[in-house]
Image (cartoon, grey):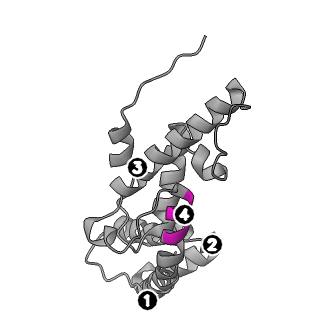
Amino acid sequence: MYLFAVIPFYSHAWSVTLFNGLNFSECHEQVKFHLGVMDLDLALLNEKPTVITDKSNKDENLFINHGKHSNILSLMFMRMNVASNTKSSISQTESVRKYLMFVKERFRSTDKSLVGILMTELMTMKFDGSCSMQNYIIEMTCILARLWTLGMKVDDTFLVQFILNPLPLEYGQF
């Protein structure tokens, strides 16, 4: 016996980071996860389903109908998670795969520039005593986490060096 928890569609939509044109990788990952949880990722995983014909059996009909349903709801879900000022620059399409490919091609390059900005911020960040040591380290690890979501892997030993090198002399014992 299976027990399913019914979670409203809109509650999934509100738990995904709003796509603003600068955070494609992060949003793409979250959208794929939520569509998978809601069992709506069929349209993303498969090419456009074939047309129902007289020769289609019951299973083929169910698969095709589920694919169409998945496509419609996936498009709605993705469009709900795009900032208003960004929506106008995304072409309207009836295929969730085409929609996602367009967004990926159009906004993926912004991820590359964001990696550069975050790496510069990570390398130039200095502990100036205006916040606690804990907050300084948390801020550094948050930058690192954002880099990871953008596909930039930074080894932990480098992170330790990024944290320790800019510390004032009074923290020399570290």
- Helix, strand or loop at disc 4? helix
The quarter in which the N terminus is drawn is top right
**Cβ–Cβ below 8 Å for labels 1 and 3?**
no
The three-letter amino acid code for the residue at tag 3 is Phe
Precedes in sequence: disc 2 or disc 4: 4
The numbered mark at residue 98 is 4
At a point 62% along the width and 72% down the height, the residue shown is 153
Q: Which residue is mark 3?
A: 77
Q: Which residue is mark 1?
A: 124
**Cβ–Cβ below 8 Å for labels 3 and 2?**
no
Precedes in sequence: disc 4 or disc 1: 4
- Helix, strand or loop at disc 2? loop
CA separation, marks 3 and 4? Answer: 15 Å
Precedes in sequence: disc 3 or disc 4: 3
**Viewer-nearest residue: 139 or 172:** 139
Among the 4 quarters of the image, the one containing residue 159: bottom right
Residue 114 is left or right of residue 2, and the answer is left
- Helix, strand or loop at disc 1? helix
The nearer-to-camera label among 2 and 4 is 4
Q: Which residue is mark 2?
A: 153
**How busy is the neighbourhood of tag 3: few (under 14 within 10 Å), some, or many (20 plus)?**
many
Q: Is residue 173 visible?
A: no
Q: Where residue 44 sits in the image (x, y, percent)?
A: 59, 52
Q: Where residue 129 sits in the image (x, y, percent)?
A: 29, 78
Precedes in sequence: disc 3 or disc 2: 3
Residue 166 is left or right of residue 150, and the answer is left
Q: Is residue 38 above or below residue 87?
A: above
Magenta-highlighted residues: 97-102
**Cβ–Cβ below 8 Å for labels 4 and 1?**
no
Precedes in sequence: disc 1 or disc 2: 1
CA separation, marks 3 and 2? Answer: 29 Å
The three-letter amino acid code for the residue at tag 2 is Lys
